Image (spheres, rainbow, N blue to C red):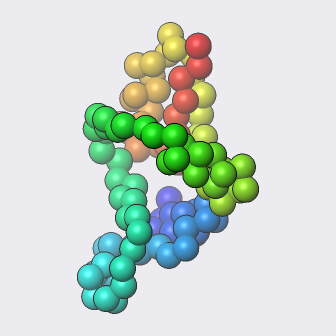
Amino acid sequence: MCRTAKVDTVRSLGADHVIDYTREDIRAAGRRYDVILDTGQTLTTLICSENTPDLLALTKLTESGQVRPVIDRTYPLSQTPAAIQYMRDGHAQGKVVMSL
C-alpha cells in the first residue's frame, strides 16, 4: 500500500492529525500532541497497567465511533504460527485476531 493510502486509512479511523514522518519533521511545526502513535511493523512486548478511568474513556470513544478497531484477519488459535508469519511478512492492514 502506498504511503498516501496509509495516511488516508489512518485519517478514516479518526486521527485528528496524521504525519508521514518520511516527509515531515514532527518537531518542525511546533505543535504539541497528546498522543503520538507510531504504526511501524515491529513486534514487541507491551506491558501496561490498566485503570478504570482510562478503560471507561476508551469505552466511550469506541462506543461513539471516534475510535474504531480495524481487524484484518481472524485465525483460530491452532494457526498462531501462520498469523505471526502473516504479520511478519507485512501483509496485515489492521489487527490480526486469534480466536479461541
Residue 60: x percent and y percent? 66, 51
Total count of labels: 0
The answer to whether residue 14 is left or right of residue 28 is right
- Residue for point 45% across, 68% down: 3
> Who's the residue at 31% across and 78% down the image?
26
Identify which residue is drawn at 40% across, 19% down.
81
Residue 35 location (% of width, % of height): 40, 64
Left or right, 36 with reference to 9: left
Identify the image quadrant of the C terminus. Answer: top right
Q: Quadrant of residue 73?
A: top right
- Name the spot of residue 17 as percent of width and height, x first: 50, 76
Res 69 seen here: no
> Residue 66's quadrant in the figure?
bottom right
Q: Where does residue 34 sit, x and y in percent of width and height?
A: 41, 69
Q: Residue at x 60, y 40 (%)?
A: 71
Residue 64 located left or right of residue 67 = right
| Camera-nearest residue between 60 and 30 | 60
In the image, residue 8 above or below residue 87:
below
List the single residue furthest toward the top.
Answer: 78
Instruction: Examine the image and state in which quarter residue 56 appears.
Output: top right
**49 or 1, which lies in front?**
49
In this rendering, is residue 47 above or below 76?
A: below
In the picture as drawn, the residue positioned furthest to the bottom comes out as 29
